[in-house]
Image (tube, rainbow, N blue to C red):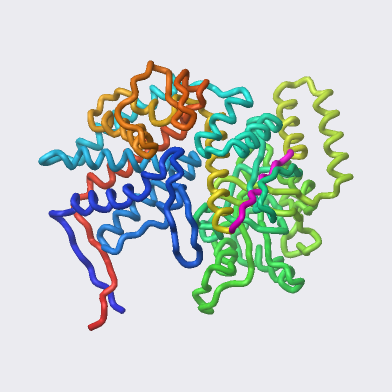
Amino acid sequence: MSTQHTIIKDKTFEVIESAVNQMVDLIKPTYGPASNKVIIDKIPYRMVVDDGVQIARDFQLEDPAENAVVKVVRETAVTTNDRAGDGTTSSLIMLQAIIREVGRKSSFNGRKIEIELKKGLEDVRKYLKNEATQIETKEDIKKVALVSFDHEEIATMISEIYHKLGKEGIITIDQSPTMKTTVETTDGTRLASGYLSPYMVTNPQRMETEIQKPHFLITDYRLTEADDVLGIMNKMAKEGKNNLIVIAENIEQHALATMVVNLPHVVNPETGKPGKFMSIAVAAPKMDNQKQFLEDLALITGAKMFSQEKGERLETAEVSHLGKANKVIVRRDETVIVDPKGNKSVVGTAVSALREAIKNENDKKKKTELQKRLAVFTNTLAVIKVGAATANEQKALKYKVEDALHSVKSAFKSGVVCGAGLALANIKTSSPILNEALKYPARQLRENMGLDGELNIKPGEALNVVTGKIGPFLDVGVVDPADVLLAGVESAISIASLLLTSSGMIVESAKEPK
């Protein structure tokens, strides 16, 4: 089948407007606690979800030109979720409102509108920073979780976990073999760095990779050649093991390419066949004491740390030198190691030595570094095991729990403001277009809940549309993390600026044979 190119010039805005409306009109009924859902039936999965980012990822249009617009919107909107973990739906609602406001003009200058919107964004940023309230109590945490997922039991569960582990607590999500959702605690640690290639993602819906029973090769070398990784990969393959996490100063060039072409979900361009070895490349986090961190990580996982300073060669690495864990979850900027399998006695000795060193250290800076090291060894990780009656329900529930966790994490970071779109609706910026767009999330939420007309409430108060209570927003549990709202507004303005400054389109599509 050949391809054909379509050039669009005069009707570019009409195509943009049509595509945005079709996409957002499907997604926006899911905004808020109304429990409106969308059925997604695509190979290889079928699900019923009210998760805006998931619907955006799967949304397509038959018209090639309109679908090209959808791709632009999707790529930028998904970054809102990657950054803040939530806020995609309200971001798309604001995007549609901006496009709608511009469409009412007889003519417009895209560049001038972009400047206007970005100037207005500064007003939004200042407002949210000034109005944000820090969350502190277990009840505050629960209220934030309930906004993302209106589920009393799970919101209570999340608040209790964070109250126990603290704001830096590590929480992961797994599937439960039963219908019940439960929490387990285990040892674990987290690296502030993730996969080096998006080809290593096995779950494109969530942009992450989860590997059971992984092996760890840990080194402070910079890996560049294929032989840097092929040796240990071949030795593992001979033993029927094919799940390797390489944590190094960096992995690049031929070394990274070798790992990519051997992935089971990547077709090798030379053989034309998919690979048979699952491996993830992770760069060691950038820090002053990186070598010490890698030594500690090797101890926790039971690995040998291959040190450049000692002249230890990677070619000598054996399978017995690799660390182990029960599971690893790798995202773009985070790696979570669940239940590492280092020698408990050796780890216990290291922990005792660190505690003694902290007690005897008088230098504040050195004491802080020792405390950070101790945290790597003593992290307790909570695993929420999501249960449901069916696989589809379990997947949808898992996404909602993830959203709630991300919201709480963002709330810890940036504080909270009045939710239900009300904080956005109260912002007055220098941009008339943006002022109107900021009102739309609150309107859409009320429409989804079947509430007519504008709310007549005092500043700082809110209506909880689930309980019917009106009062101070934190008291009645109507909150949004400030960082999530800001990410949503930034995303809407970014997409709108791209689209409104587009004066033409070149679209490639399949040409049916005659």
The tally of labels here is: 0
Instruction: Give the main secondary structure of the magenta stretch.
Output: strand
| Residue 426 horizontal/vertical position (percent) | 34, 23
Q: Residue furthest bottom?
A: 514
Q: Name above or below for residue 362 compared with residue 91.
A: above
User: 85 or 241, which is in the foreground?
Assistant: 85
x, y percent for residue 181 = 66, 46
Q: Quadrant of the C terminus?
A: bottom left
Q: Is residue 22 left or right of residue 315?
A: left
Q: Position of residue 325 (x, y in %)?
A: 74, 53
For image coordinates 74% across by 71% down, the residue present is 240
- The N terminus: image quadrant: bottom left
Depth check, front residue: 234 or 402: 402
Q: Is residue 488 visible?
A: yes
Is 432 part of what is drawn in magenta? no
Question: Which stretch is magenta?
Answer: 380-390
Q: Measuring 67% from the left and 32% from the top, which residue is drawn there?
A: 160
Confirm whether the magenta stretch covers residue 383: yes
Most extreme residue toward the top is 458
Image: 514 above or below 149: below
Along the line of sight, which residue is nearer the eye, 10 or 233? 10
| 494 sits to left or right of 296 | left
> Residue 224: percent from the left, percent from the top?
59, 60
Residue 4's image quarter? bottom left
The residue located at (84%, 39%) in the rendering is 350
Q: Is residue 291 visible?
A: no
Q: Eyeballing the image, is 266 above or below 116? A: below
Q: Residue at x 78, y 46 (%)?
A: 300
Q: Nearer the viewer, residue 124 or 200?
A: 124
Left or right of 413? Residue 18 is left
